[in-house]
Image (spheres, helix red, strand yellow):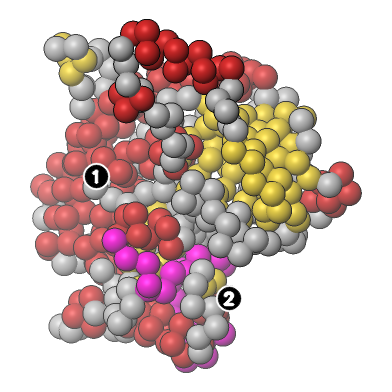
Amino acid sequence: MPSMRTSHVIALMLATGLSAARVPAARAQTADDLFNDRVVQEIRLTINSRSLSDMHANWNSNDYYTADFQWRSIRLRNIGIRVRGGFGSRNPIKLGLRIDFNRYTKGQEFLGVKSIVLDNHWQDGTFMHEFLAMALYARLGQPVPRISYCRLYINNESQGLYSIVESIDSKFLSRTLGENDGYLFSYQMQPNYKGEYQGRDLAPYKSMFEPQNHEKEADTILYAPIHDLFREINQPPDAVWRERVGELLDLEQFVTHAAFEAFVAEEDGINGTFGMNNFYLYRPAGSNRHRFIIWDKDSAFHTIEFSIVTRLDDYVLFQRALGFADLRELYLRTLEDAARLAAERPEVDGSVAEESWLEGEITRIAALITSEVREDTRKRFSTDEFLEALEYMKDFARRRSAFVLEEVARARRSR
């Protein structure tokens, strides 16, 4: 028997001549709704109080705990949750978190997603470095994780403003590369490691590259191609260096990645100040050729005058790749493309916008999150520091492209 509310709807349909077939059904929620960057989402976690206390006490541990997860009307039980983050972002005040929906319930997914990261923005006083960098890299046609903002509550207590970041996993690979059966590794930073050859023993490569799949396969299958890659990178330069390295690494994609990180003034990327960092390495099945996947851009937008050749002499791969005329030109052209896309003034209602694309995104995100930042009592930086950082970001958006284009022109004149 239909409910009272349903019967009223049916009666209204009959009275107005509408048929059931013409009544729009409620749209199912999708991952695109979760990663909608036009709204601030809300996520609620329910965790045993003892487990929560242990998480705060052992914030440097990767131990998992069970929890319940809720987003809108969707509730999942027995998910896995753990503290995450590197040396700069881990802290016991505002926990960075990883959520694995299938950790304790085999096959459980949320909107077709197996896991997400909740970024605490501990290192980023603007709360938007990650979002802006990924948005610009996507405009360059490169695969990036999706990102949106959320208010996080744990046991009904506000944890402040976070970003929801798509995990780099098989779902991401399928969505962005159209395949997911290859070998995926998360790079684990080794201080001051800049791509030097580590010798024939596979152990150093195991400590640096954590497998995200195929974990049970033999070390020789997992790591021998990575060993070969770094061996060839460090071979004395000769006529076949590029051919040998090119069989093990997509050099064009590496150069594009390096150029983008140079444009956004990345201090902690593949050519980072303290060594290589913040990337995934992927190798398709049946191939020994790797590619880099971008990750974690909290340390981007470091300085407006960040040179496009910063640390060129520190990294053998970076230096040697740019020694080839076509790869050097690709590097410069990618910098030009990034500068043009950042400075581009989109059309709005038939007229050209007053702000560039990058400054417009800064303005839009600031309008979305400023009130949330003010209310975030766990954030590392004060609200005044956040507002000052916003002004710097707008200055970056106004001046960075011109600075980079001038350096590109100077580099071309020098050859």
Q: Does residue 161 appear in the picture of this structure?
A: no
Q: Quadrant of the C terminus?
A: bottom left
Query: Is 191 contained in the magenta span?
Result: yes
Q: Residue at x 28, y 17 (%)?
A: 355
The amino acid type, in three-letter code, at marker 1 is: Leu
What span is in magenta? 178-203
Q: CA distance from mark 2 to mark 1?
A: 32 Å
Res. 335 mark: none
Write down the quadrant of residue 49 in the picture: top right
Query: Quick check: 371 left or right of 409?
Result: right
Image coords of residue 136 (percent x, y):
32, 39
**Which residue bears the numbered disc 2?**
207
Location of residue 232 in the rendering, given as x and y in whole percent from the top left corner: 32, 83
Q: Residue furthest right?
A: 50
Q: Nearer the viewer, residue 8 or 225?
A: 8
Q: Is residue 195 magenta?
A: yes
Under tag 1, what secondary structure? loop
Q: Position of residue 275 (x, y in %)?
A: 49, 62
Tell me the chief SS of the magenta region.
loop
Front-lying residue, 316 or 55: 55
Nearer-the-camera pick, 40 or 275: 40
Relative height, residue 58 to residue 4 (above, below): below
User: In the figure, 216 relative to 151: above or below?
Assistant: below
Q: Nearer the viewer, residue 196 or 158?
A: 158
Q: Residue at x 15, y 83 (%)?
A: 239
Q: Which residue is mark 1?
A: 140
Is residue 114 left or right of 353 when viewed as pictured?
Answer: right
Mark 1: give few (<14), some (14-19) or many (20+) Cα within 10 Å.
some
